[in-house]
Image: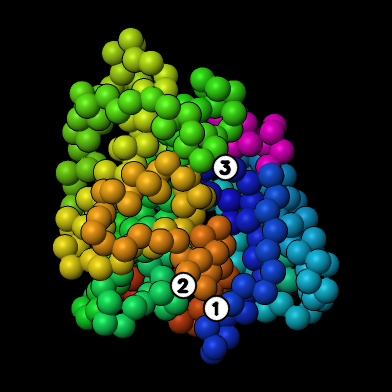
Amino acid sequence: MSGTSLDGIDVVLGDVGAAGPVVKGSLHLPLASDLRAELLALNQQGNDELRRAALAANELTRSYAAGVCALLADCEVHADAITAIGCHGQTVRHEPAAGYTIQLMNGALLAELTGIDVVCDFRSRDVAAGGQGAPLVPAFHHAIFSGGAVHRVIVNIGGISNVTDLPSSGPVTGFDCGPGNVLLDAWAQRHTGQPFDRDGAWGKSGRVLPELLQRLLAAEYFQRLPPKSAGRQTFGMDWLSCALIGREEAADVQATLMELTARTIADAACRLSPQTGEVYLCGGGARNVALSDALACAVAPRKLATTDVLGVSAEHVEALAFAWLAGEACAGRSANLPAVTGAHGPRILGALYRA
């Protein structure tokens, strides 16, 4: 898995058998700086996009393959023991209203390099069926994190934040609720030269700007009812720039962006699901201490914790989810939730490239 934040590649070895998904090993690979820059650039219109996208997909796929081979070596597991690789690819455009979503990777090349069957392109079938193609992780959250009599919400804080509502009874719902790390990381990169604001310390040094926060919260996306999904096209630096007046202190903007993330997550987790009793965080943003503190205040008196306490490390949930989705595809089972994505019905997700 490499997500919207573009902070690297997460690789997990997962057993998704009848006993339930279990992580058997994991590693994280940073993205080469030139590849990261090109993937970021491909989120915008530019010259010679088709050739550049194909070359970037191949380079990214080689990184995926290196991660798979390194993890198998670390775990002393042979490729023949692996049923399939579930590979999400790198989203560079997400336009379900226009009928498409693009995740860069080369499934055929990954199968060639690893000698393992590959399942990829998970989102396109849901979009073809009239859905948003996102979020896809709620089905996995339901399979592994449902709390029985306890009403839980699972929050994935990647580049974009999404929530999964797991009621004690009734249908599972979920949607992308707003920016997660995407703006926090981009603003930190621009003003501190660091790829992210470690523990949210820089943002915590600033103060929330109420007027800026209200301008951001007034965005049409936050008023729209689900199903809905978002990406860099929805919450990018251009969107932020339109809300700035130019006299703000950089640290204050970071503090405000952190409050925006906390506020929109809490609104989704609590106001839209007032019976919520427990909120669990996963994704890279779950390790942002200042953001977690802000969220704890925003969702109080509800319990807030990471998915670590439920048995899966916060950093591994999304990669394990796509391993699980690959398993569902190999078994011929549908894995989208039409109540979440808005698709016309259940669909088997993913394209299979045989080794």
| CA distance separating discs 2 and 3 | 26 Å
- Residue 323 in the image, given as x and y percentages of width and height: 57, 70
Confirm whether the magenta stretch covers residue 170: no
Q: What segment carries the magenta color?
A: 31-45
Marker count (numbered): 3
| CA distance separating discs 2 and 1 | 12 Å
Q: Earlier in the sequence, mark 2 or mark 3?
A: 3
Looking at this view, is 351 or 17 the one in front? 17
User: Which class describes the residues within 10 Å of circle 1: few (<14), some (14-19), or many (20+)?
Assistant: some
Q: Earlier in the sequence, mark 2 or mark 1?
A: 1
Q: Is residue 276 visible?
A: yes
Looking at this view, is 67 or 343 the one in front? 67
User: Which class describes the residues within 10 Å of circle 2: few (<14), some (14-19), or many (20+)?
Assistant: some
Residue farthest along the top direction in this orientation: 247
The vertical placement of 160 against 208, above or below, is below
> Which residue lies at the image location 67% right of the left edge and 79% below the top edge?
83
Which numbered disc, 2 or 3, marks the residue closer to the eye?
Answer: 2
> Which residue lies at the image location 36% right of the left edge and 54% below the top edge?
162
Q: On the image, numbered disc 3 is attached to which residue? A: 6
Q: On the image, numbered disc 1 is attached to which residue? A: 21
* Disc assigned to residue 157: none
Majority SS type along the magenta span: helix
